[in-house]
Image (cartoon, rainbow, N blue to C red):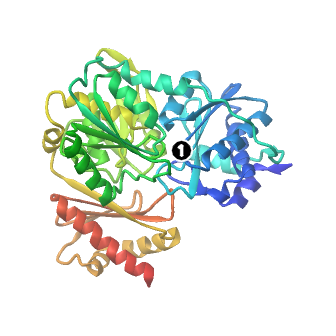
Amino acid sequence: MLVSKEVIKESGILFGTSGARGLVEQFTANACAAFTHAFITSIQSQFEFQQVAIAIDNRPSSPAMAQACAKAIEQLGLEVIYYGVVPTPALAYVSMQDNIPCIMVTGSHIPFDRNGLKFYRPDGEISKADEQAILNAIAEFEAITGLPVLTVSDKAASQYSERYTSLFDSQMLTGKRIGIYEHSSAGRDLYAPMFEALGAEVIALERSDEFVPIDTEAVSDADKQKAKNWSKEYKLDFIFSTDGDGDRPLVADENGDWLRGDILGLLCADAMNIEALAVPVSCNTAIESCERFNHVKRTKIGSPYVIAEFDALAKQYNSVAGFEANGGFLLGSDTIINDKMIKALPTRDAVLPALMLLALAREKPIYELVNALPQRFTHSDRIQNFATEISSAIIIEAKKKPKEFLSLIGFVNVDVISVDMTDGLRMTLSSNDIIHIRPSGNAPELRVYTECDILSLSVFNVNEVLSYLRRLKLD
C-alpha cells in the first residue's frame, strides 16, 4: 500500500497560486492518484457525494493524468464523470450545480513540459487551508496498474454555453465580426458557437495541434502584432482568446490592441453593477480612482485569496465579484443581468467579461470605454527559469533599502513613499510610479509589474527592472 502524503512529498509537486503544478515527469500515475485520494478523503467528512467529475486541457500529458485520477476515484468506490477537453470554469460550474467535487487536469498557461491539477469541492474552488489538508492527508491506496478508458460526456460544455447565451438577446452581436484566436485553448470548440448564437460573424484564427502556453499577463510581441494584423485583414470588431484552460481571457478592441486583464475586469464589474470587489494587489489603481464601486479589497495574488474575501464582502453588499490582472473574472454572488439570474461562479472565468464588454460596446467603441477610465497604465513581464529562492533573496534585500535598490536599477532622484509586502515587493515612488516584483506561484519565474501615467514609461520601467534582475541572475 502507498500513502498519499509520502508519494506527494517524493514527487516534488507543489501548490502554486492556483492548483498543484510540476514537471510532466513528476505527475506519475501514482502521484496523480495520491493527490486524488488525498483530496477526496480530505473533504468526505464535509460533503456527501457518489460522483467526481474530471476534465482536461489540450496538453499531450493531460489524458493519461486524467486516467490515473479516474482510477483512484474508482478505487474509492465512486463514479467518474468525464467531460473531456473543456474550460476549467465549465467543469467547475456544472460540478457546483450537481453538488459534486471535480478535478481539472491543466497547467493553465505554463509551458507544455509542465502540468497541474486543480481541485474543486462541491461548493467551489479549494482554499489554501484545503491545500494543506491535501498535502497532510494520510490516505492509503494501491499502486496504479492499468488505466481505465474514459467516455466523454458533453454536459459540461452544453451547460456552460447555455449559462451565457441565455443571458442575452440572440441578436446582441448582429453585425459584429469577431475573431477567435483558438490556438490550443481548452474551450476552442465552444467559443465560436457561443458568439454565433448571439448573432456574431466568427472568424477562426490560428488553431494549433501543438500546445501553446499563452500567458495573458505577459502577451508576446508576436501575439500583439498578430492581433493588429488580424483586426485589419478581417475587419474585426473584437478578438477573443484565452489561456490554455480557458479561465483567463485575452481580448482585443477594434484596433487589435489587447486589453489588460484588470481593465477588462473593471469594465465587466461596472457593467454588472457590482457593489464590492476583491482584487489582487497587482491590479490597476484605476479600480479605486474610477469611483464606480462601493468597496475594493486588495489581496495576495491568486484566486484562492480573492475568493476568501467573498464571504465577508457578501455580509455587507448585495453584489460581489473579483478579478485578476490576468483577466479571470470571479462572480461571488448570484446576480441579475437583463432581468435574468446568473448563478455565482467563484472561480476564474474568461467568457463573462468578454460578453459584458461586448454588451457595453453596443453603445460605444471599446477603445472609447477604455479611454474614459482614469489613465493609469500597467505593464508586466517575467523572467522564466528563475529560481524561486533567488527571487526571494533579492526581494528580502531590496526591502531593507528600497531606495538604494531602485537606484542600482537606474531610478534616481525619486523617493519610495510606500512599500507593500502583501505579495512580493510593491513600491510606490514619489513620481507616482509603481514597481512591483514577485516570484510566480506557479512556475520558477520572476514577475515584474509596473504602473505609470504613461504606457510607454510603464513598459520602459518593466524592461529596466528585468534587465537589472537578469544581470543579478547571471552574477
Residue 130 percent across, percent down from the top left: 61, 43
Q: Relative to residue 166, is residue 94 depicted above or below?
A: below
**Image position, residue 247 (x, y; %):** 44, 40
Q: Residue 312, position in %: x, y?
A: 42, 35
**Residue 118, how many percent across, how many down?**
57, 43
Q: Quadrant of the C terminus?
A: bottom left
For this view, does 25 lie left or right of residue 432?
Answer: right
- Quadrant in the rendering for residue 139: top right
> 279 or 313, which is in the foreground?
279
What residue is rendered at 29% in x and 38% in y? 295
Residue located beneath label 1 in the image? 58
The reply, left or right, for residue 245 in relation to residue 41 is: left
Above or below — where is 306 with respect to 276?
below
Q: Secondary structure at mark 1?
A: loop
Can residue 212 be seen? yes
Q: Residue at x 38, y 31 (%)?
A: 192
Q: Is residue 162 above or below residue 140?
A: above
Q: Which residue lies at the image location 48% right of the left edge and 43% below the top edge?
A: 245
**CA neighbours of label 1 inside 10 A, class few (<14), some (14 to 19), many (20+):** many
Q: Tell me which amino acid carries mark 1.
A: Asn
Q: Residue furthest front?
A: 233
Farthest residue, direction bottom: 475
The residue shown at (62%, 27%) is: 100
Inspect this view and state whether residue 294 appears: no
